[in-house]
Image (tube, coloured by chain):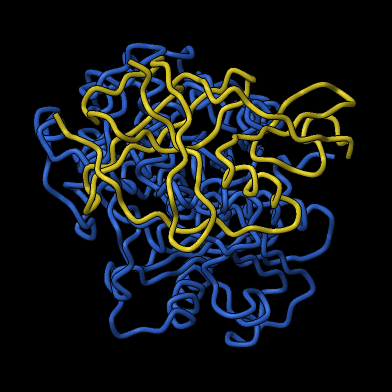
Amino acid sequence: MTIKRKAFIAGVFEHPTRKADEQSLAQLHAESAAGALADAGLAFKDVDGYFCAGDAPGLGGLSMADYMGLKLRHVDTTETGGSSYVIHVGHAAEAIAAGKCDVALITLAGRPRAEGMATGTAPRNYGSAAPDVAFEFPYGPTVVNQYAMAAMRHMHEYGTTSAQLAWIKVAASRHAQHNPRALLREVVTVEDVVGSPIIADPLHRLDCCVITDGGGAIVVTRPEVARGLKRPPVAVVGAGEAVKHQMGGKIDLTYTGAVWSGPAAFAEAGVQPSDIKYVSIYDSFTITVLITLEDLGFCQKGQGGKFVSDGTLIAGVGRLPFNTDGGGLCNNHPANRGGLTKVVEAVRQLRGEAHPAVQVKNCDLALAHGTGGSLATRHGSATLIMERA
Amino acid sequence: MLRAQDRPIPAPPVNPETKPFWDAAVAGKLLVKRCTACGAAHHYPRARCPFCGSERTEWTEASGRGTVYSYSVFRRAPVPYAIAYVTLEEGVSMMTNLVDCDLDGIRIGQGVRVVFKPTDGGPPVPMFRVVV
């Protein structure tokens, strides 16, 4: 069984806020849901499938179904960090293809800024029952220093440089200047990035994504429902997911789970990396993008630094425009989870509704990829391929 | 030159599955779990082998020697420190800190040796010093 063209993305919404002092977490989820449903031309009463992850308050799917008054026959709270929502689109397509629901709603929201959370710089502890915590937490693993270890090893094995990584931020900033809601709209240069303070060797401040409040939502439905709605329909044509971990101590930080999720999604879609017109690549850090592009097959392993240099990722300049909303590096990383907004910008591109300055011509096939957790320890990888229907 | 300073280390939570590891740490020994069914060593230690699924795992004493697989000096921290993965002679890599060294002088591939550092109210944890 395949999900190819069996489910369409009918509505998307990126919450406009970047700091939510006046809204509750449940409220942000519901505002995002309302936005995506309005985009699709549907209502809360039409939703019969609901998807959320660890950012949802209380008992997740139960609490949010209660808050929003949803009448559900399918619920899925798969939690793979920031990649969850990319996985959710694939799972929603599976549920729709199997007849388990007709209108699937996916929501994300969070308020790390309003809550003063030390997002990337405080060691995270998921509780003493986590089997890894005794063997990791004493050593001060943070989001940034773990991704930094992946970058350090990549540099060691392949000669990747900080200047090459900087091109990824440069491309994101070139796109963000056109997005009035982007947190950071200033265009930066390679020199700006490598001249910004080191946070954790070898990552600089400008190698790191923004911290924002906000959220987003996606509505997935049956093709015949989507075709009757007001928005340009976008078909889900391939999805792949994977979990990569420490492999019992046989650690290799030079690749991600995208080496598995990517081929699965390409095979289901029946397309090649060279067919893709636009990519949304999870950009928690510049290194996340570089390794992911290699793993998805857009360039050879170890050649990512060379590939991203000289503007390959810049819309209107290079051959593989990425994150044309400014991505997590410049625009928005709501709830410290960037997977949902990756899908949203890909849908904008496929609809022809991206900002004219960054809209990819004849964008009929796009890929969104999510990475959740830590490249150094445990992460989820999710690849989604979509086409203009 | 950025000399590594001692920083407060949180205590590792100990449970029945991992108590022998921490008892050995108190005695200054580094243990690695090895599977007698498939022969593979693994880390962090588990009752059940993550490679073959067997429960026939046993504690073995590691040499305490290894090499730096990767590292990052966290300069943004109040007391900068080096997180690392060290690959032990037994073939497994473990998360750790590199201590008692010039943080600016750390390199991938350097030889290291285990040293146990006290924690806040718990057993000591294995960290590594660069072998000169």
Residue at 41% from the left image edge and 43% from the top image edge: A349
Q: Colour of chain A?
A: blue
Residue A373 visible from this viewpoint: yes
Q: Which residue is nearer to you in this view: A92 or A260?
A: A260
In the displayed structure, does residue B47 sit left or right of residue A348?
right
In the displayed structure, does residue B111 sit left or right of residue A371?
left
Chain that is coloured yellow in the picture? B
Residue at 50% from the left image edge and 49% from the top image edge: B124
Residue at 27% from the left image edge and 48% from the top image edge: A355
Residue A170 spot, x, y in % from top left: 20, 33
Residue at 20% from the left image edge and 22% from the top image edge: A163
Q: In the figure, A161 relative to A9: above or below?
A: above
Q: In the figure, B10 relative to A30: above or below?
A: above
In the displayed structure, does residue A207 sit left or right of residue A254?
left
Q: Which residue is nearer to you in this view: A59 or A155?
A: A155
Residue A15 spot, x, y in % from top left: 37, 68
Residue A240 spot, x, y in % from top left: 66, 38
